[in-house]
Image (cartoon, rainbow, N blue to C red):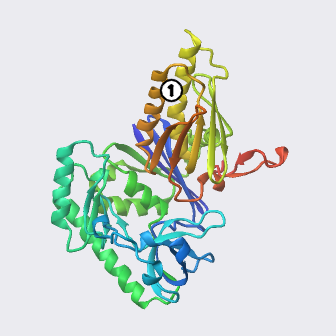
Amino acid sequence: MKQMLVHVERDVVQTAVLTNGKLDEYYTEQAADGQTVGSVYKGRVVNVLPGMEAAFVDIGQGKNAFLHIDDLLHPNLEQKPREKPPISKVVRPGQDILVQIVKEPIGGKGARVTTHYSLPGRWLVYMPYADYVGVSKKIPTEGERARLRQAGESVRQAEEGIILRTAAAGESTNSLARDVAALRGQWAGILEQAEKAEVPAIVHREAGLVQRVVRDILDAETDEIWIDDSRAYEEVLTYVRSMAPAMESRLLAYSETEKLPLFEKFGVSSELDKAFGARIRLTSGGELVWDQTEALTVIDVNTSRYTGSKDLEETVFNTNMEAAAEVARLLRLRDAGGIIIIDFIDMESVEHRQQVMGTLEALVRKDRTKCHVVGWTKLGLLEMTRKKVRGRSSGKHLEPCAACKGRGTLYVNRPSQD
Protein backbone atom coordinates (compact mmCIF):
# COMPACT_ATOMS: atom_id res chain seq x y z
CA MET A 1 0.00 0.00 0.00
CA LYS A 2 1.23 3.47 -0.89
CA GLN A 3 0.05 6.40 1.25
CA MET A 4 0.78 10.12 1.01
CA LEU A 5 0.45 12.23 4.18
CA VAL A 6 0.33 16.04 4.18
CA HIS A 7 0.75 17.74 7.56
CA VAL A 8 0.45 21.53 7.93
CA GLU A 9 1.44 23.26 11.15
CA ARG A 10 1.70 27.04 11.36
CA ASP A 11 4.24 28.06 8.68
CA VAL A 12 5.59 24.54 7.99
CA VAL A 13 4.30 22.03 5.44
CA GLN A 14 5.52 18.43 5.74
CA THR A 15 4.77 15.63 3.31
CA ALA A 16 5.56 11.96 3.84
CA VAL A 17 5.17 8.99 1.49
CA LEU A 18 4.78 5.55 3.05
CA THR A 19 5.10 2.24 1.21
CA ASN A 20 3.58 -0.67 3.13
CA GLY A 21 3.77 1.40 6.30
CA LYS A 22 7.48 2.29 5.92
CA LEU A 23 8.56 5.89 5.47
CA ASP A 24 9.95 6.09 1.95
CA GLU A 25 10.05 9.81 1.08
CA TYR A 26 9.87 13.01 3.12
CA TYR A 27 9.68 16.67 2.12
CA THR A 28 9.31 19.87 4.08
CA GLU A 29 9.00 23.55 3.34
CA GLN A 30 8.69 26.64 5.48
CA ALA A 31 6.31 29.25 4.13
CA ALA A 32 8.83 31.99 4.90
CA ASP A 33 11.46 30.28 2.74
CA GLY A 34 9.32 28.97 -0.08
CA GLN A 35 10.59 27.12 -3.12
CA THR A 36 13.04 28.90 -5.37
CA VAL A 37 14.15 26.07 -7.70
CA GLY A 38 12.02 26.42 -10.83
CA SER A 39 11.09 30.04 -10.17
CA VAL A 40 11.78 32.52 -12.99
CA TYR A 41 13.29 35.97 -12.42
CA LYS A 42 13.92 39.04 -14.50
CA GLY A 43 17.43 40.02 -13.50
CA ARG A 44 20.32 42.21 -14.55
CA VAL A 45 23.88 41.12 -15.33
CA VAL A 46 26.16 42.70 -12.73
CA ASN A 47 29.53 41.49 -13.98
CA VAL A 48 31.04 39.07 -16.48
CA LEU A 49 34.07 36.94 -15.59
CA PRO A 50 35.81 35.51 -18.71
CA GLY A 51 38.17 33.44 -16.55
CA MET A 52 35.23 31.57 -15.03
CA GLU A 53 33.16 31.57 -18.24
CA ALA A 54 30.34 32.92 -16.10
CA ALA A 55 28.33 35.98 -15.22
CA PHE A 56 26.70 37.12 -12.00
CA VAL A 57 23.09 38.26 -12.16
CA ASP A 58 21.18 40.41 -9.66
CA ILE A 59 17.79 38.73 -9.13
CA GLY A 60 16.95 40.54 -5.91
CA GLN A 61 18.00 37.80 -3.46
CA GLY A 62 20.85 39.62 -1.77
CA LYS A 63 23.55 37.36 -3.22
CA ASN A 64 23.98 37.55 -6.99
CA ALA A 65 23.07 34.42 -8.96
CA PHE A 66 25.69 32.43 -10.88
CA LEU A 67 25.13 31.95 -14.64
CA HIS A 68 27.59 29.70 -16.51
CA ILE A 69 28.06 30.01 -20.27
CA ASP A 70 26.73 26.45 -20.76
CA ASP A 71 23.41 27.71 -19.40
CA LEU A 72 23.38 30.52 -21.97
CA LEU A 73 24.03 28.49 -25.10
CA HIS A 74 21.28 26.57 -26.90
CA PRO A 75 19.82 23.74 -24.74
CA ASN A 76 19.86 21.32 -27.68
CA LEU A 77 23.37 19.83 -27.85
CA GLU A 78 23.14 19.45 -31.63
CA GLN A 79 22.56 23.18 -32.03
CA LYS A 80 25.33 24.38 -29.73
CA PRO A 81 28.42 25.85 -31.43
CA ARG A 82 31.36 23.44 -31.63
CA GLU A 83 33.56 25.95 -29.85
CA LYS A 84 32.21 28.05 -27.01
CA PRO A 85 32.26 31.77 -27.73
CA PRO A 86 33.75 34.09 -25.08
CA ILE A 87 31.05 34.81 -22.52
CA SER A 88 31.68 38.55 -22.99
CA LYS A 89 30.20 38.15 -26.49
CA VAL A 90 27.06 36.45 -25.15
CA VAL A 91 26.11 38.76 -22.26
CA ARG A 92 27.31 42.14 -21.03
CA PRO A 93 27.11 44.01 -17.72
CA GLY A 94 23.87 45.98 -17.35
CA GLN A 95 21.92 43.64 -19.65
CA ASP A 96 18.45 42.56 -18.49
CA ILE A 97 17.96 38.82 -18.69
CA LEU A 98 15.27 36.24 -17.86
CA VAL A 99 16.68 33.37 -15.78
CA GLN A 100 15.35 30.33 -13.93
CA ILE A 101 16.80 28.97 -10.70
CA VAL A 102 18.16 25.42 -10.98
CA LYS A 103 20.00 25.31 -7.66
CA GLU A 104 19.08 27.10 -4.47
CA PRO A 105 21.53 29.31 -2.56
CA ILE A 106 23.58 27.03 -0.29
CA GLY A 107 25.88 28.32 2.43
CA GLY A 108 27.60 31.49 1.20
CA LYS A 109 26.85 30.80 -2.46
CA GLY A 110 24.11 32.50 -4.43
CA ALA A 111 21.60 30.58 -6.55
CA ARG A 112 22.63 28.95 -9.82
CA VAL A 113 20.48 30.04 -12.76
CA THR A 114 19.94 29.11 -16.40
CA THR A 115 18.26 30.33 -19.56
CA HIS A 116 17.29 26.73 -20.40
CA TYR A 117 13.77 27.29 -19.12
CA SER A 118 11.53 24.35 -18.18
CA LEU A 119 8.02 24.05 -16.73
CA PRO A 120 6.94 20.71 -15.20
CA GLY A 121 3.44 19.40 -15.82
CA ARG A 122 1.59 16.25 -14.83
CA TRP A 123 2.85 14.09 -17.69
CA LEU A 124 5.76 16.04 -19.15
CA VAL A 125 8.26 18.85 -18.82
CA TYR A 126 7.81 21.74 -21.25
CA MET A 127 10.92 23.57 -22.55
CA PRO A 128 9.99 26.52 -24.81
CA TYR A 129 13.25 26.64 -26.80
CA ALA A 130 14.86 23.19 -26.50
CA ASP A 131 13.71 21.81 -29.87
CA TYR A 132 13.77 18.09 -29.03
CA VAL A 133 11.68 15.30 -27.48
CA GLY A 134 13.04 13.18 -24.66
CA VAL A 135 11.52 10.24 -22.80
CA SER A 136 12.20 9.20 -19.20
CA LYS A 137 14.71 6.36 -18.98
CA LYS A 138 12.60 4.89 -16.17
CA ILE A 139 9.96 3.78 -18.71
CA PRO A 140 11.20 0.22 -19.25
CA THR A 141 9.68 -0.93 -22.55
CA GLU A 142 11.20 0.35 -25.78
CA GLY A 143 7.82 0.14 -27.54
CA GLU A 144 6.18 2.52 -25.06
CA ARG A 145 9.16 4.87 -25.21
CA ALA A 146 8.90 4.98 -29.01
CA ARG A 147 5.12 5.63 -28.81
CA LEU A 148 5.62 8.50 -26.37
CA ARG A 149 8.41 10.00 -28.44
CA GLN A 150 6.13 10.01 -31.48
CA ALA A 151 3.27 11.50 -29.43
CA GLY A 152 5.63 14.20 -28.12
CA GLU A 153 6.65 15.14 -31.65
CA SER A 154 3.00 15.45 -32.65
CA VAL A 155 1.99 17.79 -29.80
CA ARG A 156 4.95 20.20 -29.77
CA GLN A 157 5.34 23.25 -31.95
CA ALA A 158 8.31 24.79 -33.81
CA GLU A 159 11.29 25.09 -31.43
CA GLU A 160 9.52 23.71 -28.35
CA GLY A 161 11.09 20.86 -26.38
CA ILE A 162 9.32 18.16 -24.36
CA ILE A 163 10.48 15.51 -21.91
CA LEU A 164 7.91 12.77 -21.25
CA ARG A 165 7.93 11.87 -17.57
CA THR A 166 7.64 8.36 -16.14
CA ALA A 167 4.02 9.09 -15.22
CA ALA A 168 3.22 9.55 -18.93
CA ALA A 169 3.47 5.80 -19.56
CA GLY A 170 0.12 4.62 -20.93
CA GLU A 171 -1.33 8.12 -21.33
CA SER A 172 -3.11 9.12 -24.53
CA THR A 173 -1.84 11.72 -26.99
CA ASN A 174 -4.85 13.90 -26.06
CA SER A 175 -3.78 13.95 -22.40
CA LEU A 176 -0.26 14.96 -23.39
CA ALA A 177 -1.62 17.65 -25.73
CA ARG A 178 -3.71 19.16 -22.91
CA ASP A 179 -0.67 19.22 -20.64
CA VAL A 180 1.43 20.94 -23.32
CA ALA A 181 -1.31 23.50 -24.02
CA ALA A 182 -1.57 24.41 -20.34
CA LEU A 183 2.21 24.82 -19.97
CA ARG A 184 2.46 26.75 -23.24
CA GLY A 185 -0.12 29.19 -21.88
CA GLN A 186 1.80 29.43 -18.61
CA TRP A 187 5.00 30.32 -20.48
CA ALA A 188 3.18 32.99 -22.49
CA GLY A 189 2.01 34.49 -19.20
CA ILE A 190 5.58 34.50 -17.88
CA LEU A 191 6.84 36.38 -20.94
CA GLU A 192 4.02 38.89 -20.64
CA GLN A 193 4.78 39.43 -16.96
CA ALA A 194 8.50 39.84 -17.72
CA GLU A 195 7.79 42.59 -20.25
CA LYS A 196 6.08 44.70 -17.57
CA ALA A 197 8.33 43.87 -14.60
CA GLU A 198 10.99 46.19 -13.20
CA VAL A 199 14.41 44.61 -12.57
CA PRO A 200 14.97 42.69 -10.35
CA ALA A 201 11.66 40.84 -10.09
CA ILE A 202 10.21 37.37 -9.80
CA VAL A 203 7.89 36.69 -12.74
CA HIS A 204 6.99 33.07 -11.99
CA ARG A 205 6.98 31.26 -8.67
CA GLU A 206 7.22 27.48 -8.65
CA ALA A 207 4.24 25.68 -7.12
CA GLY A 208 4.16 25.16 -3.36
CA LEU A 209 5.27 21.92 -1.73
CA VAL A 210 1.81 20.34 -1.53
CA GLN A 211 1.03 20.82 -5.21
CA ARG A 212 4.57 19.80 -6.28
CA VAL A 213 4.46 16.56 -4.32
CA VAL A 214 1.01 15.64 -5.62
CA ARG A 215 2.07 16.53 -9.18
CA ASP A 216 5.32 14.56 -9.02
CA ILE A 217 4.39 11.56 -6.86
CA LEU A 218 0.68 10.88 -7.33
CA ASP A 219 0.22 7.84 -9.53
CA ALA A 220 -2.07 4.85 -10.00
CA GLU A 221 -0.26 3.01 -7.19
CA THR A 222 -1.18 5.69 -4.62
CA ASP A 223 -3.97 4.25 -2.43
CA GLU A 224 -4.59 7.12 0.01
CA ILE A 225 -3.79 10.81 0.37
CA TRP A 226 -4.35 12.04 3.94
CA ILE A 227 -4.37 15.81 4.60
CA ASP A 228 -4.88 17.41 8.02
CA ASP A 229 -5.41 21.02 6.90
CA SER A 230 -8.64 22.28 5.28
CA ARG A 231 -6.92 24.85 3.03
CA ALA A 232 -4.33 22.33 1.81
CA TYR A 233 -7.13 19.80 1.28
CA GLU A 234 -9.04 22.21 -0.97
CA GLU A 235 -5.84 23.04 -2.87
CA VAL A 236 -5.13 19.37 -3.57
CA LEU A 237 -8.78 18.64 -4.35
CA THR A 238 -8.84 21.36 -7.02
CA TYR A 239 -5.60 20.07 -8.51
CA VAL A 240 -6.67 16.42 -8.52
CA ARG A 241 -10.04 17.24 -10.08
CA SER A 242 -8.33 19.02 -12.96
CA MET A 243 -5.38 16.67 -13.49
CA ALA A 244 -6.49 13.22 -12.29
CA PRO A 245 -10.24 13.19 -11.49
CA ALA A 246 -10.29 9.38 -11.15
CA MET A 247 -8.07 9.77 -8.05
CA GLU A 248 -10.47 12.06 -6.15
CA SER A 249 -11.93 9.23 -4.04
CA ARG A 250 -8.45 8.52 -2.65
CA LEU A 251 -8.20 12.02 -1.17
CA LEU A 252 -9.04 11.86 2.56
CA ALA A 253 -9.35 14.63 5.16
CA TYR A 254 -7.76 13.87 8.52
CA SER A 255 -9.94 15.35 11.25
CA GLU A 256 -8.45 17.71 13.81
CA THR A 257 -10.55 15.93 16.45
CA GLU A 258 -8.46 12.76 16.15
CA LYS A 259 -6.65 11.85 19.36
CA LEU A 260 -3.26 11.65 17.63
CA PRO A 261 -1.75 14.10 15.12
CA LEU A 262 -1.48 12.73 11.58
CA PHE A 263 2.26 11.99 11.68
CA GLU A 264 1.92 10.31 15.08
CA LYS A 265 -1.00 8.17 13.90
CA PHE A 266 1.03 6.72 11.02
CA GLY A 267 4.32 6.50 12.92
CA VAL A 268 6.10 9.12 10.81
CA SER A 269 7.41 11.15 13.74
CA SER A 270 9.23 8.20 15.30
CA GLU A 271 10.60 7.23 11.87
CA LEU A 272 11.98 10.76 11.40
CA ASP A 273 13.61 10.67 14.83
CA LYS A 274 15.48 7.54 13.77
CA ALA A 275 16.25 8.73 10.23
CA PHE A 276 17.88 11.99 11.36
CA GLY A 277 19.92 10.43 14.13
CA ALA A 278 23.71 10.14 14.07
CA ARG A 279 23.33 6.40 14.65
CA ILE A 280 20.66 4.43 12.83
CA ARG A 281 19.87 0.91 14.01
CA LEU A 282 19.26 -1.69 11.31
CA THR A 283 16.54 -4.31 11.72
CA SER A 284 19.11 -7.12 12.01
CA GLY A 285 20.92 -5.34 14.85
CA GLY A 286 23.59 -3.75 12.67
CA GLU A 287 24.16 0.00 12.71
CA LEU A 288 24.88 2.98 10.46
CA VAL A 289 26.96 5.87 11.80
CA TRP A 290 26.13 9.02 9.80
CA ASP A 291 28.36 12.08 9.61
CA GLN A 292 27.30 14.89 7.30
CA THR A 293 29.01 18.15 6.35
CA GLU A 294 28.04 20.71 3.71
CA ALA A 295 29.95 18.98 0.90
CA LEU A 296 30.55 15.43 2.12
CA THR A 297 28.52 12.67 3.75
CA VAL A 298 30.32 9.74 5.40
CA ILE A 299 28.40 6.62 6.41
CA ASP A 300 30.03 3.87 8.45
CA VAL A 301 28.45 0.38 8.55
CA ASN A 302 28.89 -1.73 11.69
CA THR A 303 27.62 -5.23 12.60
CA SER A 304 27.02 -3.97 16.16
CA ARG A 305 24.64 -6.48 17.82
CA TYR A 306 24.21 -8.64 14.73
CA THR A 307 26.22 -11.88 15.09
CA GLY A 308 24.76 -13.88 12.21
CA SER A 309 24.15 -17.64 12.14
CA LYS A 310 26.62 -19.15 9.67
CA ASP A 311 30.09 -17.59 9.28
CA LEU A 312 31.75 -14.17 9.40
CA GLU A 313 31.68 -13.54 5.63
CA GLU A 314 27.95 -14.31 5.48
CA THR A 315 27.26 -12.10 8.50
CA VAL A 316 29.19 -9.21 6.94
CA PHE A 317 27.48 -9.67 3.56
CA ASN A 318 23.96 -9.72 5.05
CA THR A 319 24.69 -6.61 7.12
CA ASN A 320 26.07 -4.76 4.09
CA MET A 321 23.09 -5.72 1.90
CA GLU A 322 20.66 -4.44 4.52
CA ALA A 323 22.76 -1.30 4.97
CA ALA A 324 22.74 -0.60 1.19
CA ALA A 325 18.93 -0.62 1.15
CA GLU A 326 18.72 1.61 4.22
CA VAL A 327 21.32 4.07 2.91
CA ALA A 328 19.36 4.50 -0.34
CA ARG A 329 16.23 5.30 1.67
CA LEU A 330 17.96 7.65 4.11
CA LEU A 331 19.66 9.62 1.34
CA ARG A 332 16.15 10.53 0.11
CA LEU A 333 14.76 11.27 3.56
CA ARG A 334 17.70 13.43 4.64
CA ASP A 335 18.10 14.92 1.12
CA ALA A 336 21.86 14.43 1.39
CA GLY A 337 23.81 15.84 -1.54
CA GLY A 338 27.34 16.10 -2.88
CA ILE A 339 29.97 13.40 -2.36
CA ILE A 340 28.88 10.36 -0.34
CA ILE A 341 31.38 7.84 1.06
CA ILE A 342 30.08 4.57 2.48
CA ASP A 343 32.42 2.49 4.61
CA PHE A 344 30.85 -0.95 4.27
CA ILE A 345 32.29 -3.77 6.39
CA ASP A 346 35.22 -5.38 4.56
CA MET A 347 34.22 -8.36 2.40
CA GLU A 348 36.60 -11.01 1.13
CA SER A 349 34.33 -12.14 -1.70
CA VAL A 350 34.50 -10.10 -4.92
CA GLU A 351 31.03 -11.40 -5.81
CA HIS A 352 29.63 -10.08 -2.54
CA ARG A 353 31.18 -6.66 -3.19
CA GLN A 354 29.58 -6.59 -6.64
CA GLN A 355 26.18 -7.60 -5.22
CA VAL A 356 26.26 -4.85 -2.58
CA MET A 357 27.18 -2.21 -5.15
CA GLY A 358 24.59 -3.55 -7.62
CA THR A 359 21.87 -3.40 -4.95
CA LEU A 360 22.73 0.20 -4.11
CA GLU A 361 22.79 1.16 -7.81
CA ALA A 362 19.37 -0.41 -8.42
CA LEU A 363 17.82 1.35 -5.43
CA VAL A 364 19.19 4.84 -6.08
CA ARG A 365 17.78 4.69 -9.63
CA LYS A 366 14.37 5.13 -7.99
CA ASP A 367 15.53 8.40 -6.40
CA ARG A 368 13.94 11.51 -7.92
CA THR A 369 17.26 13.28 -7.44
CA LYS A 370 20.08 12.23 -9.77
CA CYS A 371 22.53 9.79 -8.16
CA HIS A 372 25.70 8.19 -9.50
CA VAL A 373 27.48 5.26 -7.88
CA VAL A 374 31.16 5.73 -8.79
CA GLY A 375 32.47 2.45 -7.37
CA TRP A 376 34.94 1.10 -4.84
CA THR A 377 38.01 3.14 -3.97
CA LYS A 378 41.47 1.65 -3.41
CA LEU A 379 40.78 1.84 0.32
CA GLY A 380 37.67 -0.31 -0.03
CA LEU A 381 35.17 2.55 0.41
CA LEU A 382 32.15 2.92 -1.86
CA GLU A 383 31.94 6.35 -3.46
CA MET A 384 28.82 7.92 -4.95
CA THR A 385 27.34 11.34 -5.62
CA ARG A 386 23.86 12.77 -5.28
CA LYS A 387 22.93 16.01 -6.97
CA LYS A 388 22.62 18.90 -4.55
CA VAL A 389 19.74 21.16 -5.60
CA ARG A 390 18.60 22.56 -2.27
CA GLY A 391 20.14 23.15 1.11
CA ARG A 392 20.04 19.85 2.97
CA SER A 393 16.71 19.23 4.64
CA SER A 394 18.20 18.15 7.95
CA GLY A 395 19.38 21.70 8.51
CA LYS A 396 15.74 22.77 8.80
CA HIS A 397 14.94 20.21 11.49
CA LEU A 398 18.08 19.90 13.57
CA GLU A 399 19.59 22.23 16.11
CA PRO A 400 22.88 21.84 18.03
CA CYS A 401 22.60 19.87 21.26
CA ALA A 402 23.66 21.97 24.25
CA ALA A 403 24.69 18.90 26.24
CA CYS A 404 27.46 17.90 23.81
CA LYS A 405 28.55 21.41 22.79
CA GLY A 406 27.13 21.19 19.27
CA ARG A 407 28.67 17.84 18.30
CA GLY A 408 25.21 16.26 18.20
CA THR A 409 21.81 17.45 17.02
CA LEU A 410 18.18 17.34 18.11
CA TYR A 411 15.17 16.92 15.83
CA VAL A 412 12.97 19.97 16.55
CA ASN A 413 10.35 20.10 13.82
CA ARG A 414 7.98 17.43 15.07
CA PRO A 415 4.22 17.97 14.90
CA SER A 416 2.90 19.24 18.20
CA GLN A 417 0.93 17.03 20.59
CA ASP A 418 -1.66 19.71 21.42
Q: Quadrant of residue 183?
A: bottom left
Q: Residue at x 59, y 40 (%)?
A: 341
Q: What is the residue that sits farthest to the top in this orientation?
A: 310
Give the residue at mark 1. Answer: 321
Residue closest to the eye, 339 or 416? 339
Q: Residue 11 at x, y = what percent?
A: 60, 63
Q: With respect to residue 66, does 93 lie above or below?
A: below
Label 1 sits on a secondary structure element that is helix
Q: Residue at x 56, y 36 (%)?
A: 377
Residue 174: image location, x then y, percent: 17, 61
Q: Amino acid at mark 1?
A: Met
Q: Is residue 48 visible?
A: yes
In percent of width and height, residue 55 lies at 52, 77
Evaluate whether residue 204 shows in this view.
no
Whether 355 is drawn above or below 340: the answer is above
The image shows residue 372 at horizontal and vertical percentages of 46, 45
In front: 2, or 199?
199
Q: Considering only vertical position in the picture, is 361 above or below 86?
A: above
Which residue, as the protein is rendered here, is positioned at the far front? 83
Residue name at image x 57 percent, y 20 percent: 316
Q: Quadrant of residue 213?
A: bottom left
- In the depicted view, which residue is nearer to us: 118 or 46? 46
